[in-house]
Image (cartoon, grey):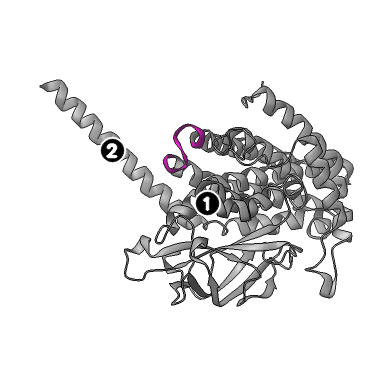
Amino acid sequence: MSVIQLSPRAEKLHKVLTAFVEDECIPAEAEYRRDLGEGAQRWKTVPQVMERLKERARALGLWNLFLTKEYAEGAGLSNYEYAVLCEIMGRSPAIAPEACNCSAPDTGNMEVFAKYGSPEQKKRWLQPLLEGKIRSAFAMTEPDVASSDATNICTRIERSSRGGYVVNGRKWWISGAGHPKCAVFITMGKSDLSAKKHSQQSIIVVPADAPGVKVVRPLTVFGYDDAPHGHCEVVFENVWVPEENLILGEGRGFEVIQGRLGPGRIHHCMRSLGMGERAMELMVQRVQSRSTFGRKISEHGVVLDFIAKSRMDLESARMLVLRAADMIDKVGAKNALKEIAMAKVMVPNIVLAVLDRAIQMFGAGGVGQDTPLADFWAGMRTLRIADGPDEVHTRQIAQLEIRQQNARLEARKQTQSSARL
């Protein structure tokens, strides 16, 4: 009996999405890779199969599932329900999330607009993003500072003498910036150096075609360029934007990014589990199809150990993420920080271990392009850094644990003191 309980609507979506991913997205992966552009066309070409799958997802009711029931623009699901669906999309990470308009960084950016955007910002940017007409990027990380501490960000957002703001700075590892449909950057920078440490930062919307915006180069992740969306170095040089492009107000950058990253980390974790499950299936199929030293590979003790550990690891990781998603639904992301952080640390490490075992069972084939394992591994190793490195989250977990235990101890002392009176 499954411990995952879904509403009837979510159950139906689960079945439809499973069939869509298994029968249409995964079989399309080879065509998608084959039709990616080469040379000068690398960052100008979107394989036609993606557009076909987007239309199919719309027809099946699988479009924009990520915005939860608190948003008028959303699909009406809870974070818990969407997390379960997100795992299915993760089985085909290069295709299924985008086909359903549920891929990062667009999901987080759309949530920013939906949660904090003005009516005009929603009309100009959120609506075309929801319709899949444009793509977006989130510009935060910088090459010259340790960006895991966002107070280090150096990009400047300064008031202009002619009104509005001027943005100057250099960013890198900006996912989505290479996509030919990328139309907007949600950009973090400092607007007031004299303010308190966590009130110096602001978030501003920068159109991708604004004068002074330059995509310098695509960056590779263990040799993968992840075209066509890519991860790019971007320069903002004297980029003027109107005052109404500021999100929420000056000095509220941290408020915006924390609201963006909480649910987003859960989405990453559940997609990761989808990759882990697919790797597990490939591993089990592989070890039953080959023999060494007079017996099937699946009969060797070390291989049985690999399979057992992988199953236990994936099940425990899933429960950790779903608990965090459930807490977001019940008490909000701000009160689920420890649970979100624990999932963000544990899941990539667990899925990496599963992928490593699967690669080992494939031997030389596991590190090549004939299976998705090497690509999955590269993405999963990156996730230990993206959206906050393990070390930052581990530090936060410990600090929250100490704070919570101290609060419980103090509460017990007060209860005991009251009982003696």
User: On the image, which quarter does residue 270 sit in?
Assistant: top right
> Which residue position is annotated with label 1?
117
Quick one: 245 or 47, which is closer to the camera? 245
Question: How far separated are the C-alphas under marks 1 and 2?
Answer: 36 Å
Q: Is residue 214 magenta?
A: no
Q: Which residues are magenta?
A: 328-335
Whether residue 288 can be seen here: yes
From the top left corner, tell me how far across and down residue 353 is, in percent.
Answer: 65, 49
Q: Position of residue 89 (x, y in %)?
A: 72, 43
Q: Would you call the spot at circle 1 few (<14 residues within 10 Å), some (14-19), or many (20 or more)? A: some
Q: Earlier in the sequence, mark 1 or mark 2?
A: 1
Q: Is residue 354 above or below residue 245?
A: above
Residue placed under numbered mark 2 in the picture: 407
Dot 1: element:
loop
Outermost front residue: 162
Q: Residue 307 versus residue 140: which sits nearer the camera?
A: 140
User: Horizontal placement of 278 versus 75: left or right?
Assistant: right
Location of residue 82 in the rendering, given as x and y in whole percent from the top left corner:
63, 37
**At x 67% / y 63%, what residue is drawn?**
183
Q: Give the residue type at disc 1.
A: Gly
